[in-house]
Amino acid sequence: MGKYALAVLLPACLLFGTAMAGEDMKVLIADRCLSCHDMEKVCVVKSNDVKWWKDSVQRMVDYQKDLLTAGEVDAMGAFLAVEANRNMVCAK
């Protein structure tokens, strides 16, 4: 029975963790990005290219030092490269 419980619980925990990470990233974007521009810049772009998004986020950090850590730049770029994540951030 223990193996079956693990087989069910592990995917559920991973899914919950991903959803929580998404909500955390949504809050981080609202907190750090909206002070300079609205979400239209994020919502109109259709690119799923991780490098493009990381480079774009890094450009924002170059304008405003200490906006994000290097890890946050990578995480935000990877997050925004996923269309479903952009849709979540852009939902009204």
Image: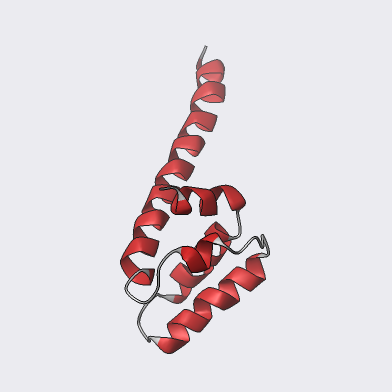
Residue ID at (53%, 22%): 8
Is residue 41 found left or right of 23 in the rendered image? right
Task: Find residue 69 and report its horizontal and vertical position in percent.
Answer: 41, 75
Task: Find residue 91 and report its horizontal and vertical position in percent.
Answer: 45, 48
Task: Find residue 36 and report its horizontal and vertical position in percent.
Answer: 36, 77
Asked if residue 75 shows in the view, the reply is: no
Image label count = 0
Q: Which residue sits furthest top?
A: 1
Q: Which quadrant of the figure has residue 3?
A: top right
Asked if residue 18 shows in the view, the reply is: yes
Residue ID at (45%, 53%): 89
6 shown above or below 15:
above
Residue ID at (37%, 86%): 65
Q: Give whichever of 7, 42 is nearer the camera.
A: 42
The colour scheme of the drawn protein is secondary structure
Task: Find residue 31 and report its horizontal and vertical position in percent.
Answer: 31, 65
Residue ID at (46%, 34%): 13
90 shown above or below 39:
above
